Amino acid sequence: MSAAVPRQTPCRKCPLKTLEIFRAVSPTELNFIEEFKSGEFVTDPGATILMEGTSNPHLYTVLSGWAFRYKTLEDGRRQILNFVFPGDFLGLQNSTFNEMQHSVEALSQMVLCVFPRDKLWDLYSKHPALAYDLTCLASRSERLLDEQLLTIGRRTAIEKMGCVLLDIFIRARHAGLATGSKLKLPITQQHLADALGLSLVHTNKTLNKLMAQRVVRWKSSTLEILDEPKLAQISGYEGAGPILRPLI
Amino acid sequence: MSAAVPRQTPCRKCPLKTLEIFRAVSPTELNFIEEFKSGEFVTDPGATILMEGTSNPHLYTVLSGWAFRYKTLEDGRRQILNFVFPGDFLGLQNSTFNEMQHSVEALSQMVLCVFPRDKLWDLYSKHPALAYDLTCLASRSERLLDEQLLTIGRRTAIEKMGCVLLDIFIRARHAGLATGSKLKLPITQQHLADALGLSLVHTNKTLNKLMAQRVVRWKSSTLEILDEPKLAQISGYEGAGPILRPLI
DNA sequence: CGGGATATTGAGTTAGTTCAACACAGGTGG
DNA sequence: CCACCTGTGTTGAACTAACTCAATATCCCG
């Protein structure tokens, strides 16, 4: 079950603040954010956070847990657009007539920071630096999509697999979720298949090829990167780089 | 050859203002935009406007002409990320350490409005409504990428072809570039192939299948949509909707 | 009237799919 | 504790969508 519980973690103690990707925020800004935040949302694995075709008046920041963003076709074919990590922002990307154009599903238990969408304009008008931060976040997520489009459109199955594993691993490490070269991953091979635009069977065979080369290991929901340079070389991985704020 | 010519069209006479997608801008904002604009840039077909791996201190708005945004792999494989139309904004999306992560190439002669990147913060701090507009623009381009990712990852060749033709046609019509059901398109089948993640040969055969069904015609660089509903039905096209400003 | 870029077509190949069977693990209830 | 069940992973075989190669046709431009 999911539950909305108001204001649990004060923003001044936000667990994300330890991540280097977040710059120091001024006290005024912090106050605004605390005001902006309408509560926290805790979900179980498998919960649908946003649903394609429905409207949702909230924006979310992921405090902890995993999710993925996806779209489906009428006959059920599914494309995972990207995996979602702590620190990622949800809901800004896609609304037309307030209808979401994509869905988001939790992979683990999650804690989300909830913001009312209709106060977004307040943020823009009163705290341009925060607005600018949002733009940098959006810019980065567009970079990730560009990279993914290149991967899906033009890389071979084994390159795709390498890219997505590296991407997940590097982003997870950034979020402090990896233990050395190991990463506990709450996803199935079906998720990988849907992220890569491949069939489940071929995904399995491709993953096994990588394992036969002793580059990665995938065992009981744990991904282990055995040879990161070789994996990067096999897959031609380039990555999208960190979130950057070129100005201010 | 390309040339930078300062301040040709005053913003108050911007040709884009006739497009319904642009809201009315206040006189103060208009003044700021005129101040922000550092000049115009005119390019010939084939010119590279932005280059992956290089840095560029400018942002651009397309006043007229066509372009496409793409990425390449080391061995030359190319993925077109999207086609660029009048009214589209370039340069915001993708910079890491000021290095572009993608390239943009002109398809026709173009006129671009040039803005210095380092004044962007001025825009955020002084004109939040314009900043908000930028966010909506970015949000929309992310929607387009999501849709494209679904297309490339999960649709069949014929669906892909239908989607990309419809998408181009609809967006061009929005920009006032279509003549009835006809559209003069300065692209080759190689461009379509690179947008769809298909080989040139298979692109040609797929296009011919659509033509055999009398759904579209492609003759001497002109696309004609003969049966738009049927094309939408064949391709399962959903589109990404217009640019919307939900607030303010 | 060339000549280069673009489009078309056929033939053979291959990467990736679908189908189907089976293996394995964890979790539940008797 | 076992028997069962469901979700996940694995494997082989047959199939097909899409690819590559290569030859030819067509268009556009100078």
Image: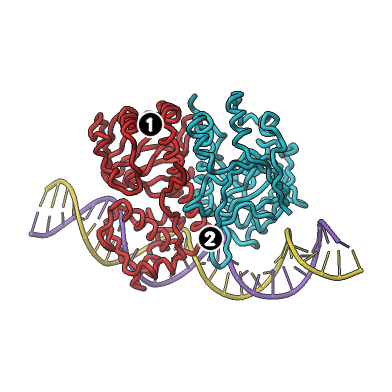
Chain colours: A red, B cyan, C yellow, D purple
For the residue pair A205 and B141, the one nearer the viewer reads as B141
- A226 to B149, vertically: above or below: below
Across and down, in percent, residue A137 comes to 43, 43
Image quadrant of residue D18?
bottom right
Residue for point 33% across, 53% down: A174
- The amino acid pointed to by label 2 is Arg
**Disc 2 sits on a residue from what chain?**
A
For the residue pair A180 and A123, the one nearer the viewer reads as A123
Across and down, in percent, residue B35 comes to 61, 34
* Camera-side mark, 2 or 1: 1
- The amino acid pointed to by label 1 is His
**Disc 1 sits on a residue from what chain?**
A
Q: What kind of element bears circle 2? A: helix
Give residue A154's mark: 2
Give residue A101's mark: none
Residue for point 45% across, 30% down: A124
Across and down, in percent, residue D13 comes to 43, 71
Residue for point 62% across, 47% down: B83
Image side of residue A2 versus residue C3, left or right:
left
Q: Are marks 2 and 1 on the same chain?
A: yes
Image quadrant of residue B203?
bottom right
- A7 to C1, vertically: above or below: above
Image quadrant of residue A204?
bottom left
Return the residue at label 1: A58
Across and down, in percent, residue B96 comes to 47, 52
Image side of residue B43 versus residue B132, left or right:
right
